[in-house]
Amino acid sequence: MTSPKINGHQLELFAQDFFAALEPAAKSPSPAPQPLFKAPPVPPRPAIPTPPRSPDAPPLRRIQLGAHSLEFELRRSTRRSIGFMIDDNGLRVTAPRRITLAEIDTAIRAKQRWILNKLHERGERRATREERPPVRWIDGALLPFLGADITLRIEDAARSHCVFDGEARTLRLGVVPGLSEWQLQERVKIWYQGEAKRLFAERLDVYAEKLGVRYASMALSSAGTRWGSCTVGGDIRLNWRLVHFSLPLIDYVVAHELAHLLEMNHSPRFWAQVGSVYPDYDGARAALRQRSQELPVLFD
């Protein structure tokens, strides 16, 4: 897997605080609006994962990236360029045989911000999964929806159905005899995705009008590490899991992606566009990261 390219053709909003080092746009002298969110204290990051090794495997290579001593697996191949693969086991680098070790180290240092961010993110996700017990798919289970819990009600039925009662905050799921747990989960996931598609389309229209832009299309994403993306052609993808969060957090991601239709970068001009329709983007960004770590484990 090659590292993602952040360029003028596609901008992606990653799940963690990817843009923390960027300076926000200068504020106008008018009174600042009250923030929607109070940023929580940032907990210490977990250790960077290290690739597991078998007894007969070649030794890992090591490189110093600032304060971090990073071990990684190096593979040689017939590919024409250096590729970076990051998963829960750490960093794997694949490089052509003609590339020297010094050139590989130089390429890693050029990508070190992205690499360290992704490794920390993987470590956080793994630590979070270990700390949070998965949801028990039983009658009365609590599921996150739009920033609050809803209650799952499972009832016997001749035909499967899934009906949400907004006033009672219940999701009634009719199950036929012999329905397995993974099929039950799939029914709920389909419901979540349907609600996400409907709601995201509504919010995109609201914020597109505010920003004076038009987008070409919207599709749902199931990406594990990013909340949204926008192409230069106006194609927007939003992670359906955003529907677990409150509407202000959904609106932040929507405003963020639509602002890329005006500025395909993360410059002060871009943040000024976001701030023109969503002033507390800093608070929302921190809250989104915090809430994502607090969600229960619903689906594998």
Image: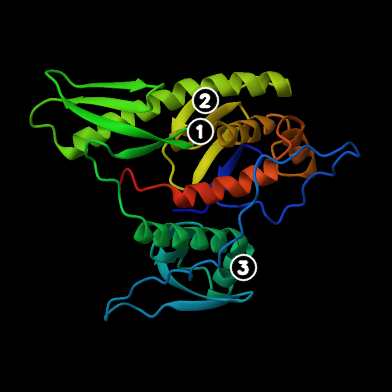
Picture mark count? 3
Give the structural element (helix, strand or loop) at label 1.
Answer: strand
Say which of 210 and 156 sits in front.
Answer: 156
Residue 162, quarter of the rendered image: top left
Q: Specify the amino acid type for callout 1.
A: Leu
| Mark 2 burial class by Cα count in 10 Å: few <14, some 14-19, many 20+ | many
Marks 2/3 in contact by CB < 8 Å: the verdict is no
Q: Specify the amino acid type for callout 2.
A: Phe
In the visual, does 199 lie left or right of 268?
left
Residue 106 position within the rendered picture, expressed as x and y whole percent measured from the top left? 61, 69
Marks 2/1 in contact by CB < 8 Å: the verdict is yes
Q: CA distance from mark 2 to mark 1?
A: 8 Å
Q: Which residue is mark 2?
A: 200
Considering only vertical position in the picture, is 5 above or below 218?
below
Q: Which residue is mark 3?
A: 109
Numbered label attached to residue 71: none
Numbered label attached to residue 238: 1
Q: CA distance from mark 1 to mark 3?
A: 31 Å
